[in-house]
């Protein structure tokens, strides 16, 4: 995650302790990313402190509900954080479906969510869950998959096509793309482009950047997941500097969609 941010031109700081997370978020951050990852009571306390610091300073914070639905403790932790108003929730289909079911309740028709296999998604689509969660939290929800989808509370969506399937064979590429989303949203908010529409565009841009970087890495020669990891960071660095052999987007396409049919 940190190397992806550095390559893209951002400046990561991994602050986790309750004693300083809130102060650091308030005074030094452009955006705060909360990644449930390896969850612990001490880490969770630090995450809440960071969120409270970001909210107090009017800065965006982003939630990655890693493996939400895997255990009651993890799901409850994700719900408690989600209720604090993230600018973006980014997860895979199972994570978003599980969080939506827990946040929106049985009345939403989402009871049960998705099936979680480790931190991997076993759902093909989470449009309905993403739309319900975005509406309930009044925030933007991004679902990563073969086609990435970014949903706003009014059920508008941006779909990002592209990337390479091998990304799922590398640990933390999903976490890294959430970090890129946080950097992009932080930059947008810092420039005065706040609100769900700007946030959604920033998230889609970050998802597209990851797809472009992955395709460029494969184009210059990747032999498997390990070399893709290295090539991905190199390609992100080229994008961060505005360079690279191909100034186009490759096969990455961003299109608008309407999720009204997902009710």
Image (tube, rainbow, N blue to C red):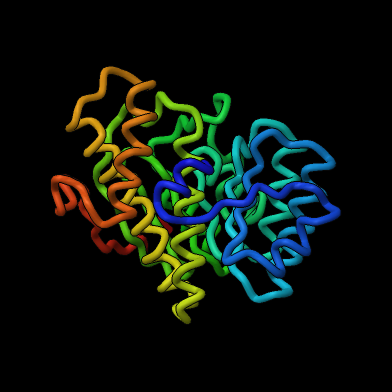
Residue 34 at what x, y percent from top left?
Answer: 64, 51
Give 135 or 142, whichever is nearer the viewer. 142
Give above or below for 54 relative to 49: below
Give 196 or 17, whichever is nearer the viewer. 17
Image quadrant in which you'd find residue 4: top left
Give above or below for 109 relative to 115: below
Give above or below for 191 relative to 94: below
Image quadrant in which you'd find residue 236: top left
Residue 184 at what x, y percent from top left?
Answer: 44, 62
Residue found 28% across the figure and 62% down from its top:
257
Q: How many marks?
A: 0
Please give left or right for residue 245 compared with residue 50 in the image.
left
Give 45 or 142, whichever is nearer the viewer. 45
Residue 215 at what x, y percent from top left?
Answer: 23, 38
Residue found 83% across the figure and 40% down from its top:
41
Tell me, yes or no, if residue 150 can be seen here. Answer: yes
**Image quarter hosting the C terminus:** bottom left
Tell me, yes or no, if residue 136 can be seen here. Answer: no
Please give left or right for residue 98 compared with residue 203 in the image.
right
Residue found 41% across the figure and 47% down from its top:
7
Residue found 71% across the figure and 32% down from its top:
71
- Give the residue furthest to the bottom: 192
Please give left or right for residue 220 compared with residue 204 in the image.
left
Image quadrant in which you'd find residue 213: top left
Residue 167 at what x, y percent from top left?
Answer: 36, 31
């Amino acid at each position: 995650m940190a190397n992806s941010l550095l390559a893209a031109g951002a400046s990561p700081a991994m602050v986790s302790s309750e004693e300083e997370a809130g102060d650091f978020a308030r005074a030094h951050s452009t955006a705060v990313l909360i990644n449930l990852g390896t969850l612990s009571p001490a880490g969770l306390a630090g995450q809440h402190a960071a969120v409270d610091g970001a909210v107090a300073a009017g800065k965006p914070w982003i939630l990655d509900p890693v493996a939400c639905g895997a255990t009651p403790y993890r799901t409850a932790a994700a719900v408690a954080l989600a209720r604090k108003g993230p600018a973006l929730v980014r997860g895979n289909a199972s994570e978003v479906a599980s969080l939506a079911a827990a946040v929106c309740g049985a009345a939403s028709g989402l009871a049960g969510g998705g099936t979680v296999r480790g931190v991997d998604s076993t759902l093909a689509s989470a449009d309905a869950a993403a739309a319900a969660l975005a509406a309930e939290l009044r925030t933007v929800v991004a679902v990563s998959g073969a086609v990435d989808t970014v949903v706003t509370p009014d059920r508008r969506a941006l779909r990002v096509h592209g990337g390479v399937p091998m990304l799922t064979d590398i640990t933390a590429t999903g976490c890294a793309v959430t970090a890129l989303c946080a950097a992009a949203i932080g930059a947008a908010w810092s420039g005065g482009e706040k609100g769900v529409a700007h946030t959604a565009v920033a998230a889609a841009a970050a998802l597209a950047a990851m797809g472009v970087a992955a395709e460029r890495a494969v184009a210059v020669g990747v032999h498997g997941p390990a070399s893709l990891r290295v090539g991905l960071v190199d390609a992100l660095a080229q994008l961060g500097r505005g360079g690279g052999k191909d100034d186009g987007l490759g096969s990455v396409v961003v299109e608008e969609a309407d999720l009204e049919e997902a009710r």
